[in-house]
Amino acid sequence: MSIEEFEIFAAGQRGDLVRRAERLLQSTSAAEDVVQDALLKLFTMRSRLDDYHSPAALARTVVRHLSLNAIRDRKSVAAIDMARMTADEEAPDEGELAGRLARTLAIMDSLPASQQMIMRMKHVDGMEVEQIARAAACSREAVYAALSRGRRAIVERFKNRVEV
């Protein structure tokens, strides 16, 4: 598929893709970001798009996967975000936030080496699961398991005020 053909394809699909992403993400701006990422991925593989029976179906699948990843990432951030407030709590000041971040990082340092490494790659370095799996020479499932165990340990130690 040529660049011009791809531009026509993308323009025709964009509205539908944004609507689909919006339904999953419940946010127009997040949906726009996901669709932009999806179209960029598809653009990089445009020379192979003609090999697919339905490039439009592929585009919808890519948007769905990226939307689900965005939802999962939001949940990950929420699980590790120790600065979350309850409705009756005052907004923490910068010093308190810095203290919470330092405590979270200290707890992260106390995790087993493999969990610690994977948590840092994901939440500090911002790497994707695929990248982490390649770097750590393990499966995606192992990365997800380590992230889950690490997050649970951090939340539990934070809630129970366990000193590190």
Image (tube, rainbow, N blue to C red):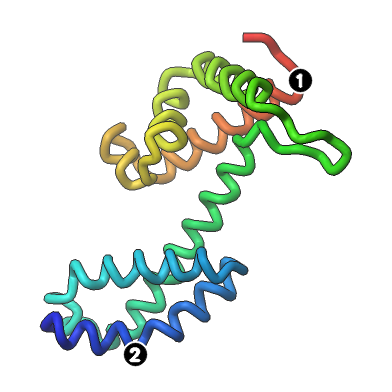
- Res 154 quadrant in image: top right
From the top left corner, tell me how far across and down residue 104 is, in percent. 59, 23
Residue linked to disc 1: 160
Question: Seen from this angle, which residue lies furthest top?
Answer: 164
In-image side of 67 versus 126 (left or right)? right
Question: Seen from this angle, which residue lies furthest right?
Answer: 88
Q: Is residue 53 above or below residue 94?
A: below
- Residue depicted at x 84% and y 35%: 89
- Residue depicted at x 47% and y 42%: 144
- Residue depicted at x 76% and y 20%: 160
Instruction: Give the residue type that dot 1 points to.
Output: Asn
Mark 2, secondary structure of its residue: helix
Residues at marks 1 and 2, CA–CA distance in whole angstroms: 53 Å
In front of the other: 76 or 51: 76
Residue 12, labelled with which disc? 2
How packed mark 1 is, by other alpha carbons closer than 10 Å (few <14, some 14-19, many 20 or more), is few
From the top left corner, tell me how far across and down residue 57 is, in percent. 36, 83
Q: How many marks?
A: 2
Mark sitting earlier along the chain (1/2): 2
From the top left corner, tell me how far across and down residue 132 is, in percent. 34, 38
Quadrant location, the C terminus: top right
In front of the other: 124 or 99: 99
Q: Is residue 36 above or below residue 121?
A: below
